[in-house]
Image (cartoon, rainbow, N blue to C red):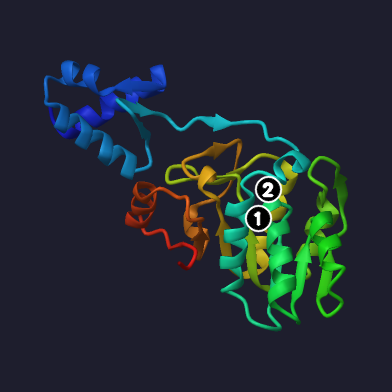
Amino acid sequence: MLAEERHRKIMELLRKDRAVKVAALTELFGVSTETVRRDLDYLEREGCLKKVYGGAVLDQVDTSEPKFQEREDWYEEEKSELAQTACRFLKEKDSVALDSGTTNLKVARALKKNFENLTVLTNSIPVMNELMEKPSFNVIFTGGVLDHGEKAVVGENCLRHLKQYRVNYYFMTPSGISLHSGFTSYGFGEVEVQRAMMDIAGSTIALCNSSCFDKVCLMKICDLIRAEAVIADSELPQEVQERYETEGINLILPEK
């Protein structure tokens, strides 16, 4: 059986059963374990599946996200690393858009410490409140409809407001990043805001803690190619880093 035929059959089995085992594929195809593993390596590089111990699975779509207040204390050290790394992209008098992800609250705190003169555009109430303490910053808060769970504003008025501006950078905080599915998140309102912020930014930088990698959420924000760089934390496994870099993703890690 040709490799292409094996690849097609593996994907048929995955779509049917959601998972495949190396041992079962070896027996089915009458090939060596090494051959099957090479097949799975190839399909993973293509973003078709995710390898796990003893086999592979399809990307599982995560459909529900805890509220902002629950997520705020998750991965604190990793988010702080992302925020400090993000500061390396900016210089005084730059402009930056921050969406309502919890990582951007860490970014706001890092900006206060590292800069004196920035323009910050945001739809996040916690980010706005944080930056109120920095009077030398020019803070622009969008109008819109309040999303209580996310402590942010969304909706048509928010999108119209965003379209009036142009910023140097947008720090995007997706909930998932996948070679196959791109950047993904949960709520329709926030995804619309993220897309609008991308449209008004000279450069989009994605901030993804290590738990976001190979994770697929309900709604696609955009393809990976839309981001100039992806900032990751120091907990990202070497194997994952190499896999994404092999596919041309510009991964930025904390300075050691």
- Relative placement, left or right, of 77 versus 162 is left
Q: CA distance from mark 2 to mark 1?
A: 6 Å
Tag 1 secondary structure: helix
- Residue 229, above or below 235: below
Amino acid on which disc 1 is placed: Arg
Q: Quadrant of residue 175?
A: top right
Tag 2 secondary structure: helix
Q: Position of residue 14 (x, y in %)?
A: 37, 23
Amino acid on which disc 2 is placed: Val
- Relative placement, left or right, of 50 versus 96 is left
Circles 2 and 1: CB distance less than 8 Å? yes
Number of on-image labels? 2
**In the image, which disc is placed on residue 215?**
none
Question: Residue at 70% of width from left, 71% of height from top?
Answer: 111
Q: Position of residue 209 (x, y in %)?
A: 55, 50
Q: Quadrant of the C terminus?
A: bottom left
| Disc 1 packing (10 Å; few <14; some 14–19; many ≥20) | some
Residue bearing mark 2 = 191
**In the image, which disc is placed on residue 195?**
1
Q: Position of residue 112 (x, y in %)?
A: 75, 72
Question: Residue at 70% of width from left, 42% of height from top?
Answer: 71
Q: Is residue 172 among what the camera can see?
A: yes
Question: Residue at 66% of width from left, 54% of height from top?
Answer: 103
